[in-house]
Image (cartoon, rainbow, N blue to C red):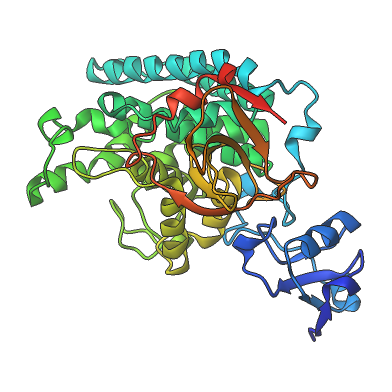
């Protein structure tokens, strides 16, 4: 029989099993409020986020109860080693990590190489040739290497949107986002490679969609939409016939337009019937599409898109556990978000603090008196000695303010840190 007990946060002890807090999960540095407290630092983080009370299970139950898998479909072997506690601080664990500015040039090369590879892959399929799987795997390996050297640099490039190159940039962005997701949550290297290959090639089926439909600026007719809706199945068929493609790498193509409530396409699958790689790719696909400007819709701020994903996860449209993990990976305020602080300053989020999602690193671009000049000050809002204390009050739309992210993200020489 389960025993629950409500205790004050200051009475928490290492070894207790936490099953709830009196704070919304998005206002805490934790992805889950169900975990065994393994050290005092976790208890301190609970106190720091403002929680007053916690709900725990008795120690006797902890000894009998196996640690839960955090994923709804934990039976999938690819995810069996994801722990229910927040992942370790990977930045501190990787000694070879380099500064954002040092990784920027290699990251740009990797990004452009990935775009060129997708151009070649599309041409290969159009000409009846096989996709160069070895080259795709090599690009995914390079993406992973860049994320290891600096986990913020390459994902920041996904925010530098180019309307004219959307088709190929979108696939690269999705590939980067799914690999970053998998690495952030502890996937093994071989699983990361399979996930990355699937993410990069998730839209390969569009090669069979006529350009007149693919590039149409207005709404589709019913017949045109029916043609477009066939691209996931077409992509799955192409990848299935491609030697060297793992079966798991096909799921992103097949399932990125499926939805948990059965309203997606092409097979109207529900959550229980979908692969984790497909569930991850759905989120990356929607996130990048909605934060990009297209001829038929205006780009939306990252924070707004994450709120949309979370709301749709609550309704069963997406896998809520995956949405929560995705938000932890990209941050409540993702790289590229334009935020206003309590001090009257405004700035651009440069990196996410995985231990404190509400306090990223922010590049201050203006104060109460107006825009500032370079070099801009980069502040870690999680730094306990930072004075004055700065908190994010609101998120702004950089497109409406005529802010060019490339001027800030891609020019690290214009920044100074404190």
> Is the C terminus in the top left, top right, bottom left or bottom right quadrant?
top right
Q: Which quarter of the figure has residue 307?
A: bottom left
Residue drawn 61% across the image and 58% down it: 71
- Image quarter (top left, top right, bottom left or bottom right) of the N terminus: bottom right
- Using the rendered view, name the quadrant where residue 78 is placed: top right
Query: Would residue 201 be visible to someone looking at this image?
Result: no
| Residue 372 vertical placement versus 22 (above, below) | above
Image location of residue 313, percent across then percent down: 46, 63
Give 124 or 357, whichever is nearer the viewer: 357
Please provide percent x and percent y for residue 79: 64, 48
Q: Check the image and report above or below for 233 versus 76.
A: above
Asked if residue 20 can be seen in this view, the reply is yes
In this image, 194 relative to 55: left or right?
left
Q: Residue at x 80, y 33 (%)?
A: 93
Q: Nearer the viewer, residue 197 or 404?
A: 404
- In this rendering, the answer to whether 177 lies above or below 23 is above
Q: Residue at x 45, y 23 (%)?
A: 407
Q: Is residue 6 left or right of residue 347?
A: right
Q: Name the foreground residue: 393 vs 171.
A: 393
> x, y (%) of residue 272?
48, 62
Q: Is residue 126 left or right of residue 150?
A: left
State which quadrant residue 233 falls in.
Answer: top left
User: Does 152 sit above or below residue 135?
Assistant: below
Q: Nearer the viewer, residue 72 or 8?
A: 8
For the view shown, which residue lies furthest in the front direction?
A: 369
């Amino acid at each position: 029989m389960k025993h629950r007990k409500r205790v004050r946060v200051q009475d928490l002890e290492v070894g207790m099993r936490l099953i709830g807090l009196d704070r919304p999960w998005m206002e805490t540095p934790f992805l889950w409020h169900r975990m065994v407290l393994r050290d005092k630092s976790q208890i301190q983080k609970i106190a720091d986020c403002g929680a007053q009370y916690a709900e725990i299970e008795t120690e006797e139950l902890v000894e009998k109860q196996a640690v839960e898998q955090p994923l709804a479909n934990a039976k999938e072997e690819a995810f069996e080693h994801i722990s229910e506690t927040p992942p370790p601080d990977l930045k501190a664990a990787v000694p070879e990590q380099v500064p954002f500015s040092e990784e920027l040039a290699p990251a740009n090369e990797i990004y452009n190489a990935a775009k060129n590879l997708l151009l070649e892959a599309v041409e290969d399929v159009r000409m009846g040739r096989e996709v160069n799987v070895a080259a795709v795997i090599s690009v995914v390996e390079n993406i992973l290497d860049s994320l290891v050297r600096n986990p913020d640099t390459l994902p920041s490039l996904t925010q530098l949107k180019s309307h004219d190159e959307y088709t190929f940039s979108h696939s690269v962005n999705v590939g980067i986002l799914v690999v970053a997701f998998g690495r952030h949550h502890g996937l093994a290297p071989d699983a990361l490679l399979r996930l990355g290959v699937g993410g990069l090639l998730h839209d390969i089926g569009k090669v069979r969609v006529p350009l007149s439909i693919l590039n149409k600026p207005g709404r589709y007719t019913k017949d045109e939409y029916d043609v477009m809706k066939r691209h996931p199945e077409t992509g799955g068929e192409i990848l299935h016939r491609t030697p060297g493609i793992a079966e798991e790498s096909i799921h992103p193509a097949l399932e990125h337009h499926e939805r948990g409530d059965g309203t997606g396409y092409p097979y109207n699958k529900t959550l229980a019937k979908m692969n984790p790689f497909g569930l991850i790719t759905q989120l990356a696909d929607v996130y990048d599409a909605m934060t990009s400007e297209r001829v038929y819709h205006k780009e939306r701020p990252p924070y707004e898109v994450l709120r949309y994903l979370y709301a749709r996860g609550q309704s069963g449209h997406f896998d809520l556990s995956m949405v929560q993990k995705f938000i932890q990976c990209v941050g409540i305020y993702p790289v590229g978000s334009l935020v206003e602080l309590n001090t009257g300053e405004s700035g651009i989020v440069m990196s996410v603090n995985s231990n404190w999602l509400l306090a990223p690193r922010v590049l201050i671009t203006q104060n109460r008196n107006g825009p500032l000049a370079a070099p801009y000050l980069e502040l870690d809002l999680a730094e306990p000695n930072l004075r004055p204390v700065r908190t994010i009050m609101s998120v702004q739309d950089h497109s409406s303010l005529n802010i060019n992210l490339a001027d800030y993200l891609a020019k690290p020489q214009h920044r100074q840190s404190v």
